[in-house]
Amino acid sequence: MAETPNNEQVAVENNFIQIQNRSFAFHWYSDSINLSKTRYRLVPYSKEWSPWTARNSAAFFNLKEGNYLFLLELPDGQIKEASIQIDLPVWKHPLFYITGIVILSFIGFMLFVILFRQRIRKITHNIEEEFKKAFKIKQKAREKTVGVNAKTVKAQARIRSRKYKKVTVLFADIQGFTKIVEHINPETLIDELDRFFFFFDGVVEKYNIEKIKTIGDAYMCAGGIPNINRTNPVEVVLAGLEMQKFMQDSKAQQNSEVGFWELRIGIHTGPVISGEIGRKNVSFDIWGDTVNIASRMESSGTAGMINITGVTYELIKDFFDCDYRGKMPIKYKGETDMYFVKRIKSELCTDEHGIFPNKKFEVKLQHIRFGDLEEFVLNKLETELEESMFYHNKAHTQDVLTQIEIIARGEKVSSEDLLLLKTAALLHDIGFIVEYHNHEDNSIRFSKELLPNFHYHDYQIDQIVELINVTRVGQRPKNYLEKIMKDADLDYLGRADFISISDNLFKELNLHNGKMTIDEWNRLQHDFIEQHTYYTATARNLRQVNKERQLQKLKVLVNS
């Protein structure tokens, strides 16, 4: 609808005629203007204007997708316009075909995987019946020993399905298994497989890794499930090194009949989906591209070696020596770098072969594991502390944690001492969740219960308890680490935002310890700061000058 110079109106309407053929009709009319002679044009469909006509409609058929502008010229030279847009049907859109190709390709890949697994099953199925019976007897006995059965699965309270962002998957496969089957009697074969897998189970349990399944001569496990952690890439590679060392030692001790057992291992880190399958015989499994890529790393590896992707390498390179192998194309994923893991770095291991980690390795790994502890504790503080905690809250814990790191690095403490200080800073106020008074006792009790779950040693927990204990009001530090802890906890006395932090503490104390006037609070603050001492040179350099300024301001308030 558009206005004429005389404020008279001409209406141009467009109607769907047949959407399947992308056809449209336009109609125009007016109650006051003579429309006996008009002409029209559809841009960009028509390059020229139509002849002048007395008709009041126009139709267009089989239009291509896109935007069109209908122009109508009136007898007085005015031009009216109306626009339309034609979209492709969903089934004719290029994205529809691309999606279809992707889906069909994925189905084809899954069929390939299924056929490949069926081929493996067919090979193992050719072993004599005696082999099968012996294997079942041995497997049931071993599962009963280690508790791997349906009841154990249910007892671990796994949910039906779950997505994990960072899981490290390991595939291990015995090289030349089909040749071994042809040259060994079934009973010996079962004994050897059982011995290998029983050792693997022990290694997996040692490093808190989840065994997924065994298929014939293949062994599959994954780190980071069902309990999420940041250290699973390092722990899975450690497990792989121990598996390879065991196979190499076994080969050296085996007789000629079973003297060619060798192991290929492939590892990749990424997201997976886990869940339970089956109704009567429930089993736990994982799916996703991470599983497929780990399998590719195994099949592309070399006997006696551990083949990892570039993703896993970036997560473990500070702990292990690795050799770059080149790139491998991965379907739908492009190319991925591959590395062979040679050994633990010489400064981080206890043996000449680089298989077993030393204390320095362990502390380095504990620093990574600290991230899991920090996430857990900060979330607990955020969700369980009362809103009336204006000072002793999550922000205060984060401030102390930050200052611990600054002072500790300034004082050049060891890596292990830094870990202990950070852990104490993280947990020193967790007891406020239970009660306000004597919260240090609750913090200590909570730390003793929690820290063993994050692989802290007893002697480390004892030191952390002492560091928490020194944060009590009036408690004097007895050693250098306690001095650092004390300085970090009272760092706010020399900060530029002292006033706002002090106000929050005043509100909190008034609420929990009884009312006091602002004058009483200023006097209390003045006396406390006047008697306070920063114990470390780093803290004095950072905060002493500003603390003295705060003291002078408080003197003015107290004496006014």
Image: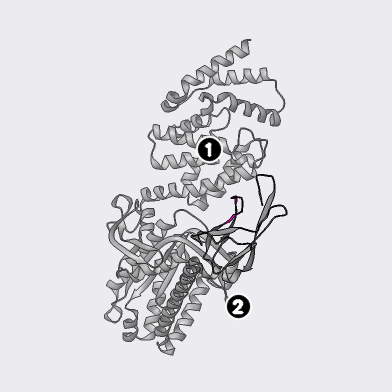
Q: Is residue 196 visible?
A: yes
**Total numbered labels:** 2
How packed is label 1: few (under 14 Cα within 10 Å), some, or many (20 or more)? some
Q: Position of residue 288 (x, y in %)?
A: 48, 66
Of the pair 319 and 530, the residue shown nearer to us? 319
Residue with the mark numbered 2: 280
Q: Position of residue 45 (x, y in %)?
A: 51, 62
Magenta region, residue range:
71-81
Q: Secondary structure at mark 2?
A: loop
Q: Position of residue 326 (x, y in %)?
A: 28, 61
Residue with the mark numbered 1: 398
Q: Is residue 473 magenta?
A: no
Quadrant for the C terminus in the image:
top right
Q: Position of residue 352 (x, y in %)?
A: 27, 56
The residue sitting at the top extreme is 560
How packed is label 2: few (under 14 Cα within 10 Å), some, or many (20 or more)? few
Q: Amino acid at mark 1?
A: Gln
| Residue ID at (44%, 76%) | 108
Vertical order, 123 against 498 (above or below): below
The residue sitting at the bottom extreme is 129
